[in-house]
Image (cartoon, rainbow, N blue to C red):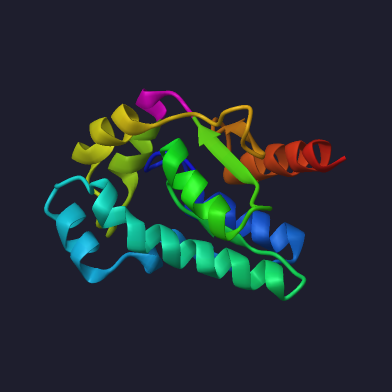
Amino acid sequence: MGVAGTGKTTVGRLLAEALGLPYAEGDAFHPAANVAKMSAGVPLDDDDRRPWLDAIGGWIRDRAGSGGGGVVAASCLKHSYRDRLRATAPDAVFVHLTGDRPLIERRMADRKGHFMPASLLDSQFAVLEPLRADERGFAVDVAGTPEEITDRALAALRTFES
């Protein structure tokens, strides 16, 4: 989880590979209307996000139900969004990718072909609610290479699960 530009897709894929788990891109769960709205520079509201969150929660539930697990990259910026996911997938663990704004802005500026414009970064930071004590998860700083970030996430996950 995290704001746009933190590397959720890249780190999520590397984390899934390291753990031997399936990976899903959270953006793929958005209805076409959501993608069109974001592409136009309009932030999504909570009503827009409900079907998206339910689809992601279903994917997590299905992976957990098959005895495995999975990694899905999704912003999940608000506590209420994560609550909605946990209602469907109570064992979900959140990896909150964090970083300073200038770094994230540079990364967003370097992205090509992504529907999420950098102009929406303000709205993402405005609604971001860091993980709370009642949520299973941890934060990982996104400074460094994708491999370094993934290594930090794996180390935190091992500590978290022991």
90 is within the stretch colored magenta: no
Q: Could you tell me if residue 11 is visible in this image?
A: yes
Q: Position of residue 157 (x, y in %)?
A: 75, 42
Q: Is residue 108 left or right of residue 140?
A: left
Does 119 sit above or below residue 141?
below
Q: Could you tell me if residue 76 is visible in this image?
A: no
Residue shown at 75% from the left, 59% from the top: 19
Range shown magenta: 99-103
Q: Is residue 146 left or right of residue 101?
A: right
Residue shown at 20% from the left, 53% from the top: 38
Q: Nearer the viewer, residue 77 or 149?
A: 77
Does 38 sit above or below residue 62?
above
Q: Position of residue 47 (x, y in %)?
A: 25, 53
Q: Nearer the viewer, residue 98 or 14?
A: 98
> Looking at the image, which residue sits at the far left?
40
> Looking at the image, which residue sits at the far front?
87
Q: Is residue 94 left or right of residue 67?
A: left
Q: Position of residue 54 (x, y in %)?
A: 43, 63
Q: Nearer the viewer, residue 86 or 20?
A: 86
